[in-house]
Structure formats: C-alpha cells, structure tokens
Amino acid sequence: MLERFSDSMTAPGIVPRIGRGLFAVADFDTGDDILHIQTPFLAVLNTERLGDTCAGCFGKTQFEKTSQEIQLRYCSGCQVPKYCDRVCAGFPAIGVTSNMMLYIDMSSQDWHLGHRFECSIFKALKPRVLPTNARAVLRIILRLAAPARSAYSPKELSLLDQLESHIDEIRDKNTASWERTTLSAMAVKHYSGTDMELEEILELSAKLEVNSFSLTTATYDRIGMYMHPYAAIMNHDCHYNAIVGFDGPQMYVKAIRPIKDGEQIVISYVDATHRYSIRKKELLERYYFTCRCDKCLVDEDEPLAMSDAVADAYALLESNSATYEGDKLLGIITNLTDNTWSLSDQPLVALVDEYIATLISEGEMESAMSAAALRYKYIDPDIYSEAHSLRVVHAWALAKIAIHIEHTSVMAVLKVYGYTTADGVVHQGEKIVVNPGMIAWSVLNSLVFEGHGSCVVPGLKDIIRRTHTQVHDEFLEQGTDMREMNDRVRIEWEKVERAAKSIVGDRTMTPINAPLLPTADSDLSDLDVW
C-alpha cells in the first residue's frame, strides 16, 4: 500500500493488470463514509448553470431554502459567477450594489483560492464566457502560479502528476474531443499568459477529461465539473461497492454494501443498469478501456442486435432532446411493455425517468405522480439496493410532487389508462381521486424511519427529515386520528398503484409494502433515525 490521504480509512495500492487503485484499510458498513473531501481540488459550474446556480455553494443553499429566500448576485468585477450571499461565497465583507452585484473584499480566503485569479480575464472576455473545460484548466494553471496561501499542496500536485491522461488515445481515437481539447488549451495559454508549453496544457486538459467527476446537486442534477486527484484513483467496476455524491462543494464516497479491510474501493463510471453493449461503448469513448468485471464477463454474451423498438428508444435518449413530449415517451414505453420488455431493464428505466421529468416540465403533475409511483414501487426495488441514494432521490421526488399537488389542488385526480390484457379482456380508462398528502407522508415516513444506512448526503437527509416533520405536524393540526392512518394510507396507495400500473398495461407486478406510520403520540425527536 502507498501513503494514505489525510485521515481517510483508505490508501492507494496496486491492482494487477490495471495499475493503481484505492483500497480500504478498515471495514466499512453500508452507508459509511469511505471518503469525505471537504475542499475540492477543482470545482466549476457548467456554462449553462452560471446564471442560476451559486458558484460558492454549488446550489446547496438554494436547495435548502426557497427561491423567495435566495436571490443570486453577480460578482461586480466580471459579472460571470453568481453567489447566494457573503457566507455562501466565503467573503467576510461584501457590499451589494443597486443592480444586485457583489462587491468582493479582496482579502477574503475564497477570493484568494479561486476567483481572484480569473476575474480580470473573465471581465476582459465579457460577454463571451469560456467553455467549462477551458475555465477548469485555466483555474488550475492560475493556481499553480499562485502565492503559497492559494497554491495546491505538494501532496495534491504529486497525486495530479501520477494520473493517467490517455492523451494518445484521445488524439488518435476521438477527433471531436481532441479538437475541443486543443482549442481550449490554446485559449487558456493565450488568456492566462502562462509560460507553460501548449503540450503541458494539453496533458493537463486530457487528465481532466478522463479523471473528473460530474459535479451534481444532492439529488444528482448535473451542474458542473469536479476533480480531486485522490478520488480519481478509484477504479471502475459495473458491480461497484461505493457510490459518489455531492453536498455543495463537499464530496462523499459511501459504501453501497459492506466492504472489508483490504478490499478495493470501486465505483461505476457509467450507468451500470444499461446493457453490456451500451456500457462498453461509453467506457471506451470516454475512458478508453474495456471493462472485464464479473458482470461484464457474464453480460458480454447478450445478443448484439436490438429490436427496432429498443433501438428507437436508445436513439431518442441519446439525442439529449430538450423538447421531449410526454405523449411520445409514453408511446415508446407502451410499445416496449407490449413486447414484454421488463420494467427493470434498460432502456425502459431511463425512459420512465425522462417521462417523469417531461411531465413535470409540462405541468402535468398528477400524471407525474402516477409515473413517479410506478418507479418507486415497481422499478427501483428491482435495480437498486435498499441503501442506494437513487432510491431515496426518487422517493423524495414522488413526495415533492405529492406535496405540490396537495398545496395547489388539495386532492389529486389520477388517470387510469385503458388497456387490454393478454387474454383479450378490455379495461376501460377512468379517473380516480387520491389524497396526495397521505402519499407524501407515507413516503417521507419510510425514508426517515427505515432509512438506516442510506447513501444519500447529509444535506438531503436534513431536508427530508424537516419536510417529514412539517407534513406530520400539518396532519396533527388538522385533527387527524393517527390510529386510523395506516388503513387510510393503504386505501390511497391502492388507488395510486392502479393508476401507476395502468401506464404499462397493468402487468403482474409485486410492489414494496406501504410503510407503516407513527402513532399520534410518536416523539420524532427521540427516534434513532437520520
């Protein structure tokens, strides 16, 4: 084993036929923090998120508070990044101008660690903004030449030097990526005024390309690029034992299952629920290797040919369309399920995710609630372990949808689609009335009281618990008899399940059980929960 990083219970080591990897030097239980990196080596927002996401907390404050409480303000120097407030930005003294910009105290720590070096460059480029990768490389290069207070530590730089760049593979096998990398490197050299040779900048750019993480919110919305050279040591395995999450600028790597002392820490670089051919393609195109994990060795025998329906579904998903239509997605989902495609197989899993997001964007909240319930009850339990953070994120999404409906319409009117069973029995469509508050309460209750070992980050755990308490108190204030709630919740879930199952023709499916609820005299503060 090589030297451990900080107080982490991990250490780099050698993996036969692969190179370096990260290993546990202690036992980890499910949900334990394997790594917790509080200060990123690099974290930058995607260009399209600069206008709506705080560059200091990366949306954490916005997530925890309402939009009415947060008003982002531009940096007064360059008017490129925005911040929630001086605490979020890390500035000890800030003034607010009449046009809602921030005057930054030049002596602040955060200023010295990041934006100080790029602000004048961004100002000179205005209204142009450098692409995400270029801003990332620029920040690293500027910090490499910074005073000791702002510079990277020798250990961080040593780890960075040891990272693979795959620059030859990028140059030879990925023309589009190489052209983008070259243009960014040329722009960085020009605007930074660095003495570094272009080849050195290209090497650094390539390292970022293959070693960075997608910076996300606590609910896995992609907002930027993150890199830390120690976290980058973790290798890929489609049967992973750890999962990455972000809570603002803080990175968490959590055990998705028990890990023994000496076991390698492995994460999945891609969505491991996809079929082998899709995983292989993504890993080759982005990371330049072919995975030989146990899952891939089993799955590589799958038929290469895809049916027309599956191929059409993947083509739609790969188009990254910003204008998905709910009816079109529903048609593809129905077509696949009519062909006995399993709900827990891709691309149906991804299609349902897109269908829910599209319905929300279209304002079809009742339909979104039915689809989210379908995912919560019949899809996630089959493809994710109980502790997986996506199980919690999807449950939280269902609860939020139900709360929104309850606050705007009181009751939800759900559509039960008409369908014909395999034996030719026709079921007519109908509409049913559901109490969304009870659905929200039961989901939140399940998360809080049964969420031991969950791999979600602390910020999401906190807001789920606070929301659960609010919903709990609202029912008590209404004089609800909690002793009757279990039966009432089961009745509401039966109706929601009918609507959810009708989306896919009411196929035979076994749902997870509706969670039991606390009694009226439950003391939530004393329970051993999140």
Image: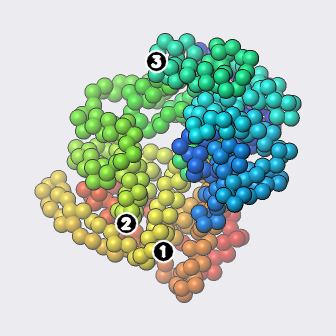
Q: In this figure, which residue is indicated by the disc labeled 1?
A: 407
**Looking at the image, which residue is at 30% across and 49% down?**
329
Residue type at the position of mark 1: His
Q: Where 381 falls versus 185 (above or below)? A: below
Residue in the foreground of this view, choosing between 59 and 346:
59
Q: Quadrant of residue 410?
A: bottom left
Q: Is residue 488 above or below residue 332?
A: below
- The residue type indicated by label 3 comes to Thr
Q: Are marks 1 and 2 in contact (CB under 8 Å)?
A: no
Mark 2–mark 3 distance (CA, rounded to whole Å):
45 Å
Residue type pointed to by label 2: Glu
In space, the residues marked 3 and 1 are separated at their CA atoms by 51 Å
Q: What residue is shown with label 2?
A: 366
Q: CA distance from mark 1 to mark 2?
A: 13 Å
**Residue 373 in sight from this viewpoint:** yes
What residue is shown with label 3? 175
Percent across and percent down for residue 8 are: 77, 37
Q: Residue at x 49, y 46 (%)?
A: 384
Q: How would you rate the neighbour count of disc 1 (Cα within 10 Å): few for under 14, some for 14-19, many for 20 or more?
A: few
Q: Nearer the viewer, residue 140 or 374?
A: 140
Relative to 357, 314 lies left or right: left
Task: Check disc 3 and report its element: helix, strand or loop.
Answer: helix
- Give the vertical position of 472 relative to 307 (above or below): below
Looking at marks 2 and 3 on the same chain, the residue that comes earlier in the sequence is marked by: 3
